[in-house]
Amino acid sequence: MIRNWLIYILTVTALLVFTVMYGRQSGFLLFLSALILPILYAGITWFCSRNIDVVFGSEPDLQDKKMSWKLQFKNITPFLEGRRGRLVYQIQTRQGKLCEEQVRDFYLKKDDSMMIQYETQYAGLYELRIKKIRLYSSFSLLSRVIRSDLKERFFVMPEYNKEFACIDRLPMQTEGESDTFLSHKEGCDPTEILGFRDYHPGDKSNRINWKVTVKTGRFMVPQYGFPIACDIAIMIDAAHLDEKSVGWILEILYSLFIQLTSRHRMCYVMWENDRSGLLVRKTMKKEEDIYETLYAVADTVNEHSICLEELYEQQYEGEYFSQVYYICQREEKMWPDEIAAKLHAENLEMIEL
């Protein structure tokens, strides 16, 4: 715009010199036109652009990790058609790491739209921020910002990766305090009755349900529920949260989730919240929990300010795990036996990023 102003000043100055030297009326009219018209056009542009409406919508293709947004400009008067505009936008991760920044020029047309596209290699939570949409007057001497600071979040789902689904064997399912029960296995929780079966030698006689026995003509005992203990944990201990590391964390989580839920196993997912500094613990029971948990991790996972096992000791001291998958990214040396002892974990598997 500085170059345009220099050209404008030189043009007006040349016309003024021409008018003074030759004193012709045509030169004077040209001088007035050059002086007034750009300012007049700028005023009309500013007035008409107040009613421009920007419609902003996304068209996700999460399968291929592509995102598209459509910008539509509405209420464009004929006077504004053909005016040059400039769009400045950036895409960053939830943690504030800049992925892309673009400056694009365009020309206004009635009922026209423009597309913003972004493709990433990594899963995660991203944010598109349109910093400003600027409209220039004729001769590009003056401009006006018609929209600024438009934001939209978008989440890219991870893919299943066999390399990260490193579950060869799991400890046997144990009973524990839970509101989730196995449908195919009998347990010892009398608060959950799955059904009734015939009395077998060895069953306690006080378990006989006489009402059902009278109805069926056979000695019947109730089948108690088997409450599933949540004795598996996945812990996320990250030191540097760039686009790549967050993507890997989500891909590992997703692959482990699929393996565990396919085997009807519950697990905890734990990480440090970047807002509160506390340990977040979410329970994964079924496939429907996967998306919510992945989004929560991408949204709040923090670069650790304290070792995660120490944070766990402070909030959940005394709990036991048969298996812990520890997703870690630390510069200092880690000792798995010490971490397992602090987490009260029978088995601990380190997954380093």
Image: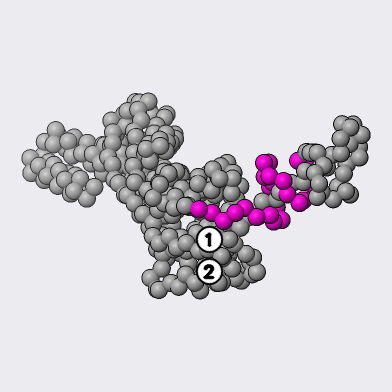
Element type at marker 1? strand
Marks 2,1: beta carbons within 8 A: yes
Q: Residue furthest front?
A: 201
Quarter occupied by the C terminus: bottom left
Which SS class for mark 2? helix
229 on left or right of 257? right
Query: Amino acid under label 2?
Result: Ala
- Residue for point 63% across, 68% down: 315
Is residue 242 shown to the viewer in this render?
yes
Percent from the top left, x then y, of residue 216? 87, 31
Q: How many C-alpha atoms fall within 10 Å of the one at disc 2: few (<14), some, or many (≥20)?
A: some
Tell me: residue 54, above or below residue 128. above
Q: Which residues are magenta?
A: 169-194
Q: Position of residue 112 (x, y in %)?
A: 35, 28
Q: Is residue 233 left or right of residue 145?
A: right
Residue 69 seen in render: no
Chief secondary structure of the magenta span?
loop
Q: Is residue 319 above or below residue 84?
A: below
Q: Amino acid at mark 1?
A: Val
Q: Is residue 37 left or right of residue 248?
A: left
Residue where numbered disc 2 is placed: 340
The residue shown at (39%, 50%) is 163
Mark 2 and mark 1 lie on one chain; the one further toward the N terminus is 1
Q: Is residue 193 magenta?
A: yes
Q: Nearer the viewer, residue 315 or 179?
A: 179
